[in-house]
Image: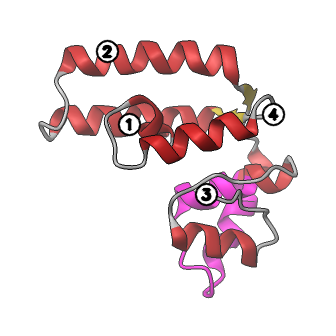
Amino acid sequence: MLVALHTPDRFQERATGLIDRLRPELLLSDFGAAEFSSAVARMVRTGLLKEPDARVCFDDFDLWSTRDAVAAAVESADIRAADGFVRRMDTALRAPDAIHLAVARRLDASLATFDRQLAVAGKLLGVTVAEM
């Protein structure tokens, strides 16, 4: 979802609307920020974005995250919880998504995602999923 906010994306309008609705209580984990950076870098490597445009995306994201989001650190307990989520055979989660869910659950925060499978797993695990 964060990539949709800061790069040309088909979800950009929906992501912006959701962020506007969530203010001022938007949490951003350090892991979520790293995933954003990874997605933008991948867009450069695959030719979907030029490097100068990626730098603008990074600058825009950095400004947005310090101005509009509250930082949330990932803790060791989140990694252990994510491991438990992944070991459940009814969630089909991969580790990165499980970490996002573990952080959201620990903080009693709603998870914002366009990923339907992640939303279903979140609900199964007792995490509130923001209406997109």
Q: Which residues are magenta?
A: 79-102
Pointer 4 and pointer 3: residues touching (CB < 8 Å)? no
Which quadrant is home to the C terminus? bottom right
From the viewer's perspective, is residue 129 above or below residue 29? below
Front position among marks 4 and 3? 3
Q: Residues within 10 Å of mark 2 (few under 14, many from 20)?
A: few
* Sequence-earlier tag: 1 or 3: 1
Going by the numbered disc 4, the residue's amino acid type is: Glu
Q: Main secondary structure of the magenta part?
A: helix
Front position among marks 2 and 3? 3
**Residue 28 marker:** none
Pointer 1 and pointer 3: residues touching (CB < 8 Å)? no
Q: Residue 81, image x and y in percent?
A: 75, 61
The residue wearing badge 3 is 132
State the CA–CA distance, disc 2 to disc 1: 13 Å
The secondary element bearing badge 4 is classed as loop
* Sequence-earlier tag: 1 or 4: 4
The residue wearing badge 1 is 38
The residue wearing badge 4 is 25
Going by the numbered disc 1, the residue's amino acid type is: Ser
* Sequence-earlier tag: 2 or 3: 2
Residue 100 falls inside the magenta stretch: yes
Camera-nearest residue between 3 and 17: 17
* Sequence-earlier tag: 2 or 1: 1
The secondary element bearing badge 2 is classed as helix
Q: Residue 79, image x and y in percent?
A: 69, 53
Q: Residue 104, image x and y in percent?
A: 76, 51
Q: Residue 18, image x and y in percent?
A: 63, 44
Q: Residue at x 31, y 35 (%)?
A: 8
The residue wearing badge 2 is 55
Q: Residue at x 64, y 37 (%)?
A: 19
